[in-house]
Amino acid sequence: MSVIASTSGTREHYTISEVAALTGLTAHTLRWYERIGLMPHVDRSHTGQRRFTTRDLDWLAFVGKLRLTGMPVADMVRYAELVRAGDHTREERRELLEATRRNVLTRVTELQETLAVLDVKIAHYGTACGGTPT
């Protein structure tokens, strides 16, 4: 889902403060993303103010999902570089995303196992405290 879907109307450009408000990222983080190459080149107004597009917002939403996977920043930057390099990098991009997916599935399994242990402990305390097991 696009970040833009939550905004009213269609606009062509957004200031850094508007993007910060829409994404929950700080202006400092947005500037850092641009500096390290995680963001594509952001257009500037005649006064030098950053002018983000809907496409930039969509990219930031995707980067947010990558962050949630635990993907290292260096891998996210590499992915961004591959995207900018063009279609001939599709296979490498797919491999990078598949590796990330495998890591996420491992973490999901670990979390499910941890949840099962917590459930056993919670049931034990429920019984020990005079309640009924859940």
Image: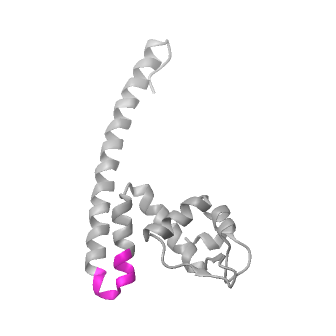
* Residue 8 x, y percent position in the rendering: 74, 74
Direction from residue 51 to residue 123 in the image, left or right: left
Q: Quadrant of residue 97?
A: bottom left
Direction from residue 118 to residue 29 in the image, left or right: right
* Residue 56 x, y percent position in the rendering: 55, 76
Q: Is residue 112 magenta?
A: no
* Residue 101 x, y percent position in the rendering: 31, 61
Q: Is residue 134 visible?
A: yes
Quarter of the image with the N terminus is bottom right
126 relative to 98, above or below: above
Report the residue that reaches farthest toward the bottom.
87
Which stretch did the figure color magenta? 81-90
Q: Residue at x 68, y 65 (%)?
A: 17
Give whichever of 126, 113 is nearer the camera. Answer: 113
Q: Quadrant of residue 122?
A: top left
Q: Residue at x 61, y 80 (%)?
A: 53
